[in-house]
Image (cartoon, rainbow, N blue to C red):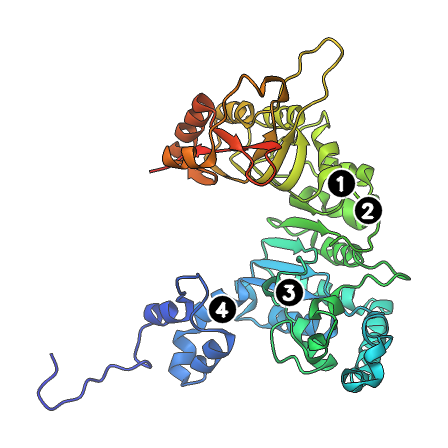
Amino acid sequence: MDAPGRKSQASLEGMPGELMAMIVEASGVDNEFILDVKDASNLRQASRRIHATSFDAFAQRFFTTRKHVLSPKSLRCLEHIAQDAALSPYVRELAIGPECLHPGFIIRKILERPLRNGKWGKKFNKFEPAWRALVEQQAGFEVSNADIASLKKSLQGLHKLQKVRIDAHPDLEDEKAWCAAYGRDSILDLLGNNRFVGRPEWSEAPNGPEAQNALVNEAADVYKLHGHYARVLEAVSSIAHKPDWTLDISLNTLGLRYRKVPFDLDSRAWRTVVHRVRSVSLERTGSWFDNKVVSPAWVDRLLRDCPNLESLELNEDTNNNEHLLLRNETFANLRHLTIRQNVFRDKNVIRFLAAHAGTLESITCEDVHLLRTPSGPHAPVKAPSWHDTFEIMLDMPRLTAVKFSGLTQDLDYANIHSTTYCGDDALQNAGAELAVTLRGDEVVRVLRRAVEEKLTSYRSEAKLSLKAWFPKTE
């Protein structure tokens, strides 16, 4: 206890590094950091001691995982990090995103609009010089291969790097993901007053384009939606000799223009690093409705090329994924499977899971519908069932984590008059739920009950399919 009349000497500056780390890394109920980038940076400027005691927490938070794009400003920043003896050892994961300036964005989205000569037209016109300058800068950067050279230099300086990600475009609605890459804001700032996240001045016009559209290069004459893959692979191949790093690849067409062959699977760069691939994510590379698909043969070859694949994610990707599930090959090291917003034949899902029963450790299925498999002339009609799928999962010795929600299946039309299905209210009263996240021993316990009780109900909105329910976890 302090002596009477004496003031406590405790201060922010006197805090040990452990407490300073707790302040820098503190998060709220929504898991968002309490101190944003600006606040954390300002804190470190308060004094030399605070700058020193907060360094480790600051570096771990902002430099362990870095995301950049192939723009001059973004890659210059990455070079500076790689050359910094204090910061570069903290970088463990590097993601390179495809975000870059759409060369046809201003003309196609803005200048050709009838609003050009009105109130908003005057605002649009002031962006044109900046846009033209950026287009020229970007073209020169690519033609000279300066982006590849810069990325190579950075990769060779990041000696503690463990993972490289070649990211796809985020969904257009996911503003937070569009803000993740360093260098993204600098493009929007030059095109106008970037006052809000994803809301520069020109996006506020009636029918004006969203900020994300400025960063999606889908110009009809170049088809560069997937243009960054080959360039990043060329740079990444320069560290093929380094041990202990892996490569993750994501594809997402956004339902826009696309390349049927995103990059050359016979290229020297790909063949050099293919054994490093541990994760592949496919999103909207196929479509039932408009036949916009990345070549299924190319996707098949991509996956067959990856002998060490451990994680596979299939999002809203029905055509290619259904084709994938028909394959006879298995992924010998597949540990994690994620399927979202897809429709499959039940027998294909069961066959795929059975083929990987010995290796799968986690399974996520969200908004997945099972179709009945067409029967032969002498085969009985059998409705699909998620409970048959759960039985396969019960025989997986390594499965320790599952996440299910929105699972539906075709109605059993053959037995619709003789079978009673519970309604949603009855199932809820019985303590059942539509979504579960299970770990450890809960996986077997809940799935076994689900198989035994076969809880299902009519789909509320259409009553054309059944929803799978689960016993409530305690």
* Chain-order first, disc 3 or disc 1: 3
Foreground residue, 161 or 442? 442
* Chain-order first, disc 2 or disc 1: 2
Q: CA distance from mark 1 to mark 4?
A: 36 Å
Q: Callout 2, which amino acid?
A: Lys
* Chain-order first, disc 1 or disc 4: 4
Please determine whether, in this image, residue 225 is positioned above or below residue 215: above
> What residue do we see at 17% from left, 88% from top?
7
Please determine whether, in this image, residue 448 is positioned above or below residue 276: above
Q: CA distance from mark 3 to mark 2?
A: 24 Å
Q: CA distance from mark 2 to mark 1?
A: 18 Å
Question: Disc number at residue 196?
Answer: none
> What residue do we see at 63% from left, 70% from top?
182
Q: CA distance from mark 4 to mark 3?
A: 22 Å
> What residue do we see at 70% from left, 11% from top?
379
Is residue 305 in sight in this rendering?
Answer: no
Q: Considering the numbered disc 1 on the image, is that residue within a helix, a strand or a loop?
A: helix
Pair 3/2: label in front: 2
Q: Residue furthest left?
A: 4
Question: Disc number at residue 292?
Answer: 2
Q: Considering the numbered disc 4 on the image, is that residue within a helix, a strand or a loop?
A: helix
| Picture quadrant where residue 316 is located | top right
Q: Residue furthest top?
A: 378
Q: Which residue is mark 4?
A: 59
